[in-house]
């Protein structure tokens, strides 16, 4: 099955070079505030798409269980070291364009700094919609092409692409910025209702970050975040969208598995190739009775990227 090209962080020291030593404490703390404002205080099962090394995962502590998904196995290994192996965390290496989960499974999902690398954003968003339950909450962060810096650069003739058009811009290979109107129309067309929009990182300017204490920048950013309800001109935008089904499918009217004592992790999965579920647990791998493919399980990470046959 062909999928769009994937931005793979395998073997990357992204967590250390970008977050820990990259002078991004301001952005990280602004994100923590936005997540607190948008996430339900508690829930059952949350899917973290593009979890990386688990930088945000502990911020979802109100959920009973969190499924960390990333395309890079080494990123998930770093997350395991940070969070430990416990029943609370499930580690899954998989392609966001081919999610290995049964429909309607999650009551919440987050995708932070991930859409930025998606060549086919609507396809990835559609996958998230499918695995959310009716009334499921989706917290999406995207990089905004209509930010003040790009508008100024464009008006001064220093940037070729227009920030005003709706199409995504790929400014570096597999790095995309999106127009807020495009994101809104994709989500609405899929049946999401947008409940809140916050703008972030208003002060992502090297000079400001060097001369103004981080706590002060974070404070003013936290106030400015609310202006996202009226306009979005910052480089990063957070959206809270809720899945609304006009007519719930029969399968979604039932009680989700985690509420009637069948919350085995195996019941979460379907085959990403043929969509068959349930898979059969063979200890070292999960076997698909539908197409016969075997999906590896090693050191607590379920790997749905390529079958091991
Ligand atoms: Zn299969």
Image (spheres, helix red, strand yellow):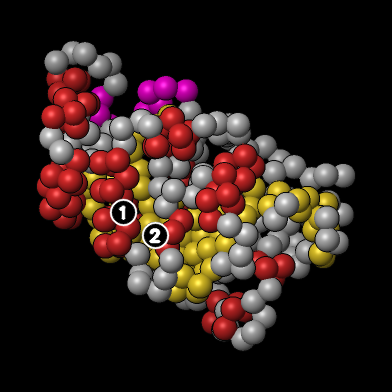
The residue that label 1 is drawn on is 32
**What residue is rendered at 53% in x and 63% in y?**
66
- Tell me: is circle 1 under 8 Å from ligand 1: no
Closest to the observer, 253 or 27: 27
Disc 2 on helix, strand or loop? helix
Quadrant assignment for the C terminus: top right
Quadrant location of the N terminus in the rendered image: top right
Q: Position of residue 21 (x, y in %)?
A: 38, 32
Is residue 272 placed above or below 38 in the rendered structure?
A: above
Could you tell me which secondary element the residue under label 1 belongs to? Answer: helix
| Res. 17 visible in picture | yes
Q: Residues within 10 Å of mark 1 (few under 14, many from 20)?
A: few
- Magenta run includes residue 164: yes
Give the residue displayed 35% in from the left and 64% down from the top: 39
Residue at 15% in and 38% down: 213
294 or 192, which lies in front?
294
Q: Which residue is mark 2?
A: 59
Residue 85, quarter of the rendered image: bottom right
Q: As drawn, which residue projects farthest toward the bottom? A: 260
Q: Is residue 76 in the magenta section? A: no
Mark 2–mark 1 contact, CB under 8 Å? yes
Classify residue 201 as left or right of residue 67.
left
Residue 136 placed where, x, y %?
A: 44, 69
- Residue at 21% of width from left, 26% of height from top? 206
The correct choice, above or below, for 210 with respect to 125 in the image is above
Highlighted magenta segment, given as a residue range: 162-173
């Amino acid at each position: 099955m062909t999928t769009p090209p994937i931005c793979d962080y395998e073997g990357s020291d992204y967590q250390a070079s970008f977050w820990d030593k990259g002078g991004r404490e301001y952005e990280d703390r602004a994100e923590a505030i936005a997540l607190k404002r948008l996430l339900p205080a508690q829930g059952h099962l949350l899917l973290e798409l593009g979890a990386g090394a688990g930088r945000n995962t502990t911020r979802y502590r109100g959920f009973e269980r969190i499924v960390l998904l990333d395309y890079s196995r080494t990123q998930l290994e770093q997350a395991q070291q940070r969070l430990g192996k416990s029943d609370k965390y499930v580690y899954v290496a998989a392609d966001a364009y081919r999610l290995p989960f049964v429909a309607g499974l999650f009551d919440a999902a987050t995708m932070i700094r991930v859409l930025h690398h998606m060549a086919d954003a609507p396809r990835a968003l559609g996958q998230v919609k499918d695995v959310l339950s009716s009334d499921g909450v989706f917290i999406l962060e995207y990089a905004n092409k209509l930010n003040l810096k790009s508008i100024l650069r464009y008006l001064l003739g220093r940037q070729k692409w227009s920030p005003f058009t709706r199409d995504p811009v790929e400014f570096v290979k597999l790095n995309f910025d999106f127009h807020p109107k495009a994101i809104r129309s994709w989500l609405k067309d899929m049946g999401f209702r947008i409940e809140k929009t916050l703008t972030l990182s208003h002060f992502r300017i090297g000079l400001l970050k060097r001369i103004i204490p981080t706590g002060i920048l974070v404070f003013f950013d936290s106030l400015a975040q609310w202006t996202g309800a009226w306009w979005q001109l910052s480089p990063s935008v957070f959206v809270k969208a809720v899945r609304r089904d006009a007519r719930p499918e029969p399968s979604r009217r039932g009680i989700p598995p985690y509420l009637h004592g069948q919350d085995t992790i195996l019941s979460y999965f379907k085959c990403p190739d043929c969509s068959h579920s349930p898979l059969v647990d063979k200890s070292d791998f999960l076997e698909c009775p539908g197409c016969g493919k075997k999906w590896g399980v090693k050191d607590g990470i379920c790997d749905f990227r390529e079958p091991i046959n």
